[in-house]
Image: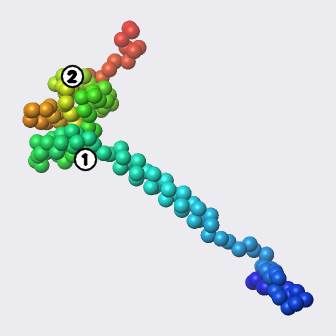
Amino acid sequence: MASATPRLTTRGQVYAVAMTDESGERSRTAAPLIIAASIALLFVAVAVITNAVRARLSPQKQAAVAACEAAYGTSRPAIVGGDVFDDAESQGLADTLDRLGYAPGKPSEAPMAPGAVAIVWQLDDGSHALCTVVPGAEPVVGPLSSRPSPTPSPSASAS
């Protein structure tokens, strides 16, 4: 328990109060908790802002997404995510198709005519679909089903 002993000057004014803690424990403050919560809140705010900035699509891509979703319809497996590529991002499309295990660079799967937009969707059944929008034409939607044969290991091709 803390006790305070006022010390008086000769004129009767209090000039200091000595606080002693009889139990020997230091009092705890909320400052470290407030600082930690502030830092965590700052990180969350930065993550949300970064995500919002990166998630913005150009008007061309937004129009392509709307057209593709309308062409896709609702009778197929639900779309759970996707990547959108314009004609300047054809290498990104090829890399995505390669990462997913589909043959990249096939003209039938990755047509990137000037002004074209391609969308690779992940569907809720684990499969993928591709939608391509070329200016002046209807969107073309189809499943990505032609997986390449497994790439042979370098040791197998050397023998």
**Element under label 1?**
strand
Above/below status of 129 relative to 32: above
**How far is mark 2 from mark 1, CA to CA?**
25 Å
Image x and y of residue 92, in percent: 31, 30
Q: Does 30 appear above or below 122?
A: below
Q: Earlier in the sequence, mark 2 or mark 1?
A: 1
Q: Residue, x 16% and y 45% (percent of image)?
A: 66
Bin the neighbour count of mark 1 within 10 Å (Cα to Cα): few under 14, some 14-19, many 20 and up. few
Give the amino acid type for the residue marked by disc 2 in the picture. Answer: Lys
Please state if 36 lies on the left or on the right of 17 as rendered. Answer: left
The residue positioned 29% from the left and 29% from the top of the image is 89
- Residue of label 2: 106
**Percent from the top left, x then y, of residue 15?**
82, 82
Q: Residues within 10 Å of mark 2 (few under 14, many from 20)?
A: few
Q: Looking at the rendered structure, which numbered label has been put on residue 128? A: none
Q: Is residue 92 above or below residue 157?
A: below
Q: Nearer the viewer, residue 144 or 30?
A: 30
Q: Secondary structure at mark 2?
A: loop
Measuring from the top left, give residue 37's x and y in whole percent: 54, 62
Q: Position of residue 105 (x, y in %)?
A: 25, 22
Front in this rendered view, residue 65 or 17: 17
Q: Which mark is residue 80?
A: 1
* Quadrant of res 29: bottom right
Q: Is residue 112 above or below residue 48?
A: above
Is residue 146 in view from this perspective? no
Return the residue found at the far top. 159
Q: Nearer the viewer, residue 48 or 119?
A: 48
Q: Is residue 94 left or right of residue 113?
A: right
